[in-house]
Image (cartoon, grey):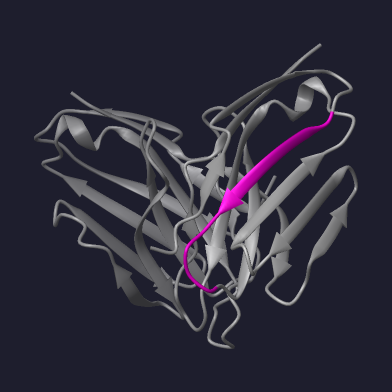
Amino acid sequence: ETGVTQTPRHLVMGMTNKKSLKCEQHLGHNAMYWYKQSAKKPLELMFVYSLEERVENNSVPSRFSPECPNSSHLFLHLHTLQPEDSALYLCASSRDSSSGIVAEQFFGPGTRLTVL
Amino acid sequence: SQQGEEDPQALSIQEGENATMNCSYKTSINNLQWYRQNSGRGLVHLILIRSNEREKHSGRLRVTLDTSKKSSSLLITASRAADTASYFCATAGSGNTPLVFGKGTRLSVIA
């Protein structure tokens, strides 16, 4: 195990549903990330939180809303998703890079999301 | 773009053979990292090589970095069926720029 857990592991939702993905890390890291992984596409960085502040938002649609209540927990709130949002959503954590060195990331097992 | 590109996209070898995967990138980097992903699972960090390093070893893994050619290679020696996975390189720029992942190489090791 990597020390990063994600729930649920699988999620099927309709386009009008509201759901949340949860991520928890037990590594003492202070940076956390949400990635989207679709078939045959590179891993897409969605959001970055460093020291509980959002530092990256790569033009992600507003139907995805992140929340980082503390350095150990990260949520991704979902509402009115589209079928093309179906993908594997991965959470990761790392030491923050304020020292100027980008550290290795530790990933959770992912949530396989299907939007009907 | 800083994004690394792995080559080949897919590789199939017999158990016991060596597997070599390459990664090329376009801009200067602080470090380069390799990750493995088993099907439908999260990525697992394998090795990090800094821009001032040329070679690094970890068990059966050997990573090289040539900053003049903006390329890196991952060698897995004496491959096993359990090495079957997708392998990604990720480049890290300077400062707080996030990691940028390539599309990966899918390795199949046949027993």
Q: Is residue A50 magenta?
A: no
* Percent coordinates x, y for residue A6 in the rendering: 49, 45
Given residues B91 and B45, the one toward you in this image is B91
User: From what the image shows, is residue A104 above or below residue B39?
Assistant: below
The segment highlighted magenta reads B18-28
Query: Can you name the residue that lies furthest to the bottom here?
Result: A99
User: From what the image shows, is residue A97 above or below residue B46?
Assistant: below
Looking at the image, residue A89 sits to the left or right of residue A102; the answer is left
**Residue at image coords 50%, 84%:** B95
Looking at the image, residue A83 sits to the left or right of residue A111; the answer is left
**Residue at image coords 50%, 64%:** B99
Residue A96 found in image quarter = bottom right
Query: Can you name the residue that lies furthest to the top here?
Result: B111
Looking at the image, residue A28 sits to the left or right of residue B91; the answer is right
In which quadrant will I find the C terminus of chain B? top right
Residue B22 found in image quarter = top right
Q: Does any portion of residue A103 appear in the rendered image?
A: no
In which quadrant will I find the N terminus of chain B? bottom left
Given residues A80 and A17, the one toward you in this image is A80
* Percent coordinates x, y for residue B26 in the rendering: 47, 63
Q: Is residue B25 magenta?
A: yes
* Percent coordinates x, y for residue A43 in the rendering: 42, 47
Q: Does any portion of residue A43 appear in the rendered image?
A: yes
* Percent coordinates x, y for residue B83 in the rendering: 75, 29
User: From what the image shows, is residue A4 above or below residue A70?
Assistant: above
Looking at the image, residue A46 sits to the left or right of residue A61; the answer is right
